[in-house]
Amino acid sequence: MHPDPTQLAETARRELEEILASDKPLTPKQRMSITPQIMPAQDPAIRRGNINEVALGYSAEQARLEAQRCLQCKNAPCVSGCPVRIDIPGFVQAVADGDFQQAIDIIKRNSLLPAVCGRVCPQETQCQAPCTVGRALKDVDKAVSIGRLERFVADWERVQNKTETPAVKPETGHKVAVIGSGPASITVAADVRRAGHAVTMFEAFHKPGGVLLYGIPEFRLPKKIVQMEIDTLTAMGVKIVNNFVVGRTRGLTDLLEKDGFEAVFIGTGAGLPKFMNIEGENLVGVFSANEYLTRANLMRAYDTERADTPIYRSRKVAVLGGGNVAMDAARTAIRLGAAEVHIVYRRTEKEMPARVEEVAHAKEEGVIFHILENAKRIVGNEHGLVTGMECLRYELGEPDDSGRRRPVEIKDSEFMMELDTVIVAIGNDSNPLINQTTPDLKANKWGNIIVDDNGLTSLPRVFAGGDIVLGAATVILAMGEGRRAADSINKLLAKA
């Protein structure tokens, strides 16, 4: 039976009252004995049929109780796991004290996107991985739920209508161009604008938000939250130009040499999907996860009453891959009406790069997992439509460069799956357009732009960060890259 959100809140309220009634501070042993708080969520049977957010967020009592579990370690190992170095013990203590305004103020010293990061960042492999509580209990899932607390205070601020526009220093007369509007670009635009410089953001799509908008489904990250962050930039005075493809509409060097920009930041992300390069990938019914999710998210194909976006109506779907994008595609397919959705992954669940929570949610919603299997070829009928997929079974061998055990094909293990749709979600390469149209911009063999320790590219006054540098990574890592580049841009312009 799925936990009832009201009951979770009531249980937390009673346990919190007992703690607060004592006039003695909790010992570390008592803190570690506090029950880790379960995130309230929609019932799986109900959420399969809607696009609404699955995780409902902590109640105030749950948040305060979860925050009581923090040991306030003097060496703060959690901070070392945070790419933007948030004062985690400080904000968690403020939550424990019930001072939610203080908590969000502490977070916003380092992060402009707490409502986003609290929802989609893999805290279990970042700030929560070194948590002393999780290590003492020998289970990272029992670490203090830093991400959920971050989400709680960000949502509290929004619900209380206490969100304030960051202060902007007096105008300096300097102009900066930001290419792309994902998390790295949002961070750069905000930090550079705070310094008083004029910022223009160029977005190729008709709406800003980057991967936050087109890549992450509504049920994980509501689009109104992304729009609020964009609105904050606009309120700060950032100019946003949509339908503008740098490298086509305008060359990168033109921005510097003809348009008067004194610095440029490239944050165009990793938007080039990878394919399997197997027989049948050109059949009707085969999609990259990028296209599938963009149609459903940015173009709202799920909203059939108000959107005319075409999308393939599927009966039996296979999603190839084991990352968060694969989970997003599979769970989206369910919500678009597929009768069966299968995840096909060539390693075991232990090696899956997807968040544990996303895998669990997918299973709850009826996604069928096929581990140690992979596609060999996709087959179709005389009309060019997908009818099935021939697969191979695997076993794990020695670790590869990623540290995960390498999948080894089992000879003569072929079998067929009956399907009408295949979604390829095996990763993305960096967006190649700017590299292709700017010969002097150096990139590595994977197409990632090469930068120095300051985020500076091979071109003077051109900086880059996020997935275009890192390859497909996380929101918070992209923000960390953006923060570094923004600091370099501000220092450059201070000397001008």
Image (spheres, rainbow, N blue to C red):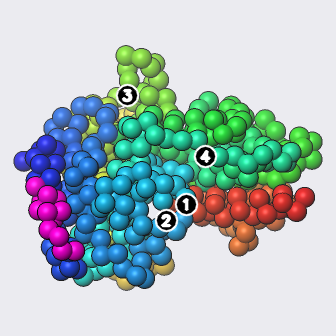
Alpha carbon distance from label 3 to label 4: 35 Å
- Helix, strand or loop at disc 4? loop
Numbered badge on residue 119: none
**Residue 371 pos. (x, y %):** 27, 62
Q: What residue is shown with label 1?
A: 110
Q: Earlier in the sequence, mark 1 or mark 2?
A: 2
Q: Main secondary structure of the magenta part?
A: helix
In the rendered picture of this protein, how many numbered marks are placed on residues?
4
- Helix, strand or loop at disc 1? loop
Numbered badge on residue 166: 4
**Residue 287 pos. (x, y %):** 45, 41
In-image side of 450 versus 284 (left or right): right
Point out the image quarter for the C terminus: bottom right
Q: What residue is shown with label 2?
A: 86
- Helix, strand or loop at disc 2? loop
Amino acid beneath label 4: Pro
Badge 3, how many Cα within 10 Å: few under 14, some, many 20+? many
**Residue 323 pos. (x, y %):** 39, 58
Q: Which residues are magenta?
A: 14-25
Alpha carbon distance from label 1 to label 3: 35 Å
Q: Are marks 4 and 2 in contact (CB under 8 Å)?
A: no
Alpha carbon distance from label 4 to label 2: 17 Å
Q: Mark 2 or mark 3, which is nearer to you? A: 2
Q: What residue is shown with label 3?
A: 302
Badge 1, how many Cα within 10 Å: few under 14, some, many 20+? some
Alpha carbon distance from label 1 to label 2: 6 Å
Q: Earlier in the sequence, mark 4 or mark 2?
A: 2
Q: Nearer the viewer, residue 202 or 431?
A: 202
In-image side of 293 versus 267 (left or right): left
Amino acid beneath label 2: Ile
Q: Mark 1 or mark 3, which is nearer to you? A: 1
Q: Mark 4 or mark 2, which is nearer to you? A: 4
